[in-house]
Image (tube, rainbow, N blue to C red):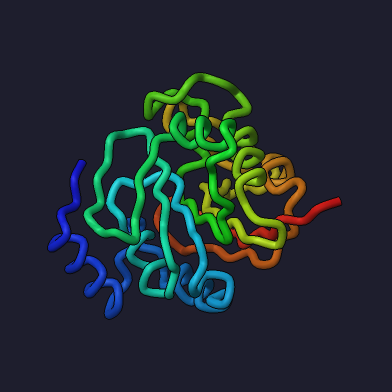
Amino acid sequence: MNFPAEQFRRLLELERVQNVNRYRDKNVVKPLLKKYARAIRGKNAAVVGTQTPWAEAMLLNLGARHVTTIEYRKLMIADNRVTTVTPYQMAERFSSGRAEWFDVVFTYSSLEHSGLGRYGDPLTPFGDLEATAQLWCMVRPGGLLVVAVHESRNRRSCSVMWNGARIYGTERLQHLTANWRVLDAQNAGDYWRHGVYVLQKILN
C-alpha cells in the first residue's frame, strides 16, 4: 500500500482541523496525546500497525521529529520524516544493535491481533504480551507507550474472536501492562470500545 507525498500532505492538513482517527474515537486520543506533548515534540516516535497513516500524521503534527511505522504488510509513506519497516526487519535491527531508541510508541487496535495470524503473523497465544515486551525493550527508559485495545463490557471476562482479535478484561490488561507505570486510562468511546492507556517504561 502506497501513500504518495501529495496524499500524505493532504492527510496532514486534514488532521490539523478534524479527527482523522479511522476508528472514530470521540475526540479522546488527540487531547490525551496533547497532555503528553513534551514526550512527543522533537522526539523519535513509532507507530505499530497501520492501515492508513492517520496516527503518523497526528504524531508529526504534534511535533515528532521522526516516526517509524512497524507493519507486516509492504507499505510506503512518502515523507522523509517517516520510515516503514516490518516487524522482522525491526527485530533484525534490534538484534544487530542498529535499532534506535523510541521516546514514544503509539499503537491503536493492533496488539490485540498479535499472535492470531490474521495479518500473516506467527500463531502464539501470548503474541500480544510478547509484542508488548518487545516494545518495552525498544522504548527509552522513562519513555511512553500509548496503546488502545478492545475492552470487554464485562471487565471480569476476556475472550478471543478467532482469528480477529482479543477482547480484554481486567486480568489480561494487568498482564499487558506489567512492567509499565500506568499514567492515564481513557475510554475512546468508539464502536469497538477501545480503552486507551498511556504507559511509562520503568526500571526495577
Query: Where is residue 57 shown, x and y percent of the image?
Result: 33, 65
Query: Where is residue 121 shown, x and y percent of the image?
Result: 44, 25
State left or right for residue 183 relative to residue 150. Answer: right
Q: Is residue 90 above or below residue 148?
A: above
Q: Is residue 140 above or below residue 162?
A: below
Tell me if residue 165 can be seen.
Answer: no
Residue at far right of view: 204
Q: Quadrant of residue 73?
A: top left
State left or right for residue 76 relative to residue 113. Answer: left
Tell me if residue 36 can be seen.
Answer: yes
Which residue is painted at 42% across and 51% down in the image?
68
Which residue is painted at 44% across and 68% down in the image?
64
Which residue is painted at 59% across and 56% down in the image?
145
Q: Quadrant of residue 118?
A: top left
**In front of the other: 146 or 166:** 146
Q: Quadrant of residue 15?
A: bottom left
Q: Is residue 173 above or below residue 17?
A: above
Query: Where is residue 110 shown, x and y percent of the image?
Result: 46, 43
Which residue is painted at 60% across and 44% down in the image?
135
Query: Where is residue 25 shown, x and y percent of the image?
Result: 40, 64
Residue at far top of view: 123
**In front of the other: 148 or 26:** 148
**In front of the other: 186 or 72:** 72
